[in-house]
Amino acid sequence: MKKSNATSQNAPIKPLDFRSVVLYVTYSMTAVEIRALRGKLGWTQMALAEAVGVTSNTVARWERGEMAISEPASRLLQKIAAEEKLRIGKR
């Protein structure tokens, strides 16, 4: 008797269950967006660097477009901006 193999051509095809699929959208900020956000926050490059955990030179390079911001740093920066907006709105 031949063993059944799940990958055989006669195996039934199961429909995909998309309820468990998570879509993850990545978004990186542009140099102009980073500089504009820092300006809206009223922060120096040093203050932004300390908040994100990078050097002020890295922030300057992001703002000049010499280096792309990492996706985690971009998410952190956007979260900081959202929290500052909420904090300012509560005044």
Image: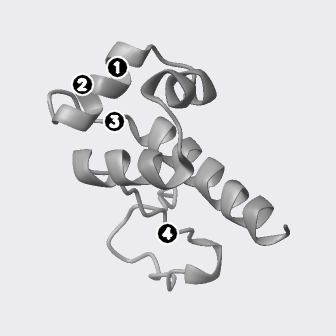
Q: Are marks 1 and 3 in contact (CB under 8 Å)?
A: no
Q: Amino acid at mark 1?
A: Thr
The numbered mark, 3 or 4, whose residue comes first in the sequence reads 4
Counting from the top left corner in percent of width and height, residue 55 is at 45, 13
User: Residue 28: in sight, yes or no?
Assistant: no
Q: Which residue is mark 2?
A: 61
The numbered mark, 3 or 2, whose residue comes first in the sequence reads 2
The numbered mark, 4 or 2, whose residue comes first in the sequence reads 4
How far apart are the alpha carbons under marks 4 and 2? 31 Å
Q: Which residue is mark 3?
A: 69
* Rendered image quadrant of residue 83: bottom right
How far apart are the alpha carbons under marks 3 and 4? 22 Å
**What SS does tag 4 mark?**
loop
Q: Residue at x 51, y 61 (%)?
A: 4
Residue 15, compared with residue 43, is above or below; it is below
Q: Residue at x 59, y 54 (%)?
A: 81
Q: Are marks 1 and 4 in contact (CB under 8 Å)?
A: no
The numbered mark, 1 or 4, whose residue comes first in the sequence reads 4
Q: Which residue is mark 1?
A: 58
The numbered mark, 1 or 3, whose residue comes first in the sequence reads 1
Q: Are marks 4 and 2 in contact (CB under 8 Å)?
A: no
Counting from the top left corner in percent of width and height, residue 64 is at 17, 33
Q: Residue at x 33, y 35 (%)?
A: 69
Q: Are marks 1 and 2 in contact (CB under 8 Å)?
A: yes
How far apart are the alpha carbons under marks 1 and 4? 30 Å
User: Residue 82: in sight, yes or no?
Assistant: yes
Between 25 and 20, the one lying in front of the other is 25
Q: Amino acid at mark 3?
A: Ile
Q: Amino acid at mark 4?
A: Leu
Q: Which mark is residue 13?
A: none
Numbered disc in front, either 1 or 3: 1
Q: Which residue is mark 4?
A: 23
